[in-house]
Image (cartoon, helix red, strand yellow):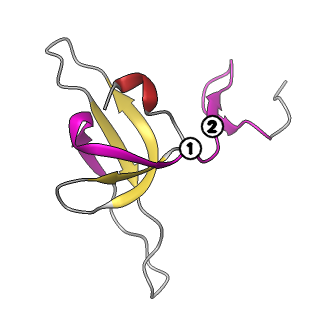
């Protein structure tokens, strides 16, 4: 899968382990080993599950989800949120 297809907020799945969640970070390295940080949903008991980094070649897009844009002052906001001032 090409890096351009994976964006912040996409629901993705690791093809090796089946780990599924939302892309919350992208890392692009000079060596070409690009990675994504995947945040899963909470478990059946309502507890947070740890985030994990995966090589982008192992990741498949499940759904586009909401796009997340960074604000000029830093941080992130959902695309349907009003702009910050």
Residue position for label 1: 64
Looking at this view, is 60 or 73 the one in front? Answer: 60
Could you tell me residue 80's position as x and y percent? 79, 40
Residue displayed at 13% across by 15% down: 31
Q: Residue at x 44, y 78 (%)?
A: 47
Q: Classify residue 39 by image quadrant.
A: bottom left
Span colored in magenta? 52-80
- Badge number at residue 67: 2
10 Å crowding of disc 1: few (<14), some (14-19), many (20+): some
Q: Residue furthest top?
A: 30
> Does residue 25 appear to the left or right of 64 in the view shown?
left
In the image, taking residue 58 as reference, residue 42 lies left or right, namely right
User: Mark 2 falls on what kind of element?
Assistant: loop
Residue located at (31% from left, 32% from top): 1
The reply to whether dot 1 and dot 2 touch (C-beta < 8 Å) is yes
Quadrant of the snapshot with the C terminus: top right
Q: How many numbered callouts? A: 2
Is residue 56 part of the magenta span, yes or no? yes
Q: Is residue 72 above or below residue 8?
A: above
- Separation (CA) of disc 1 from disc 2: 8 Å
Q: Secondary structure at mark 1?
A: loop
- Few, some or many C-alpha atoms within 10 Å of disc 2 (few <14, some 14-19, many ≥20)? some
Judged left or right of residue 38, residue 33 is left
Q: In the rendered image of this protein, does residue 56 appear above or below residue 30?
A: below
Place of residue 40 in the rendered image (x, y in percent of width and height, measured from the top left): 42, 62
Residue shown at 86%/35% (left/top)?
Answer: 82
In this view, 34 is above or below 65: above
64 left or right, relative to 6 = right
Residue 62: percent from left, percent from top: 45, 52
């Amino acid at each position: 899968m090409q890096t351009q297809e994976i964006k912040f907020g996409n629901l993705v799945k690791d093809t090796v382990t089946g780990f599924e969640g939302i892309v919350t970070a992208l890392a692009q390295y000079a060596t070409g080993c690009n990675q994504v940080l995947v945040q899963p949903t909470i478990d059946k008991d309502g507890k947070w599950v740890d985030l994990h980094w995966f090589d982008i070649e192992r990741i498949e897009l499940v759904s586009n989800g909401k796009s997340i844009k960074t604000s000029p002052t830093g941080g992130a906001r959902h695309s349907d949120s009003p702009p910050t001032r």
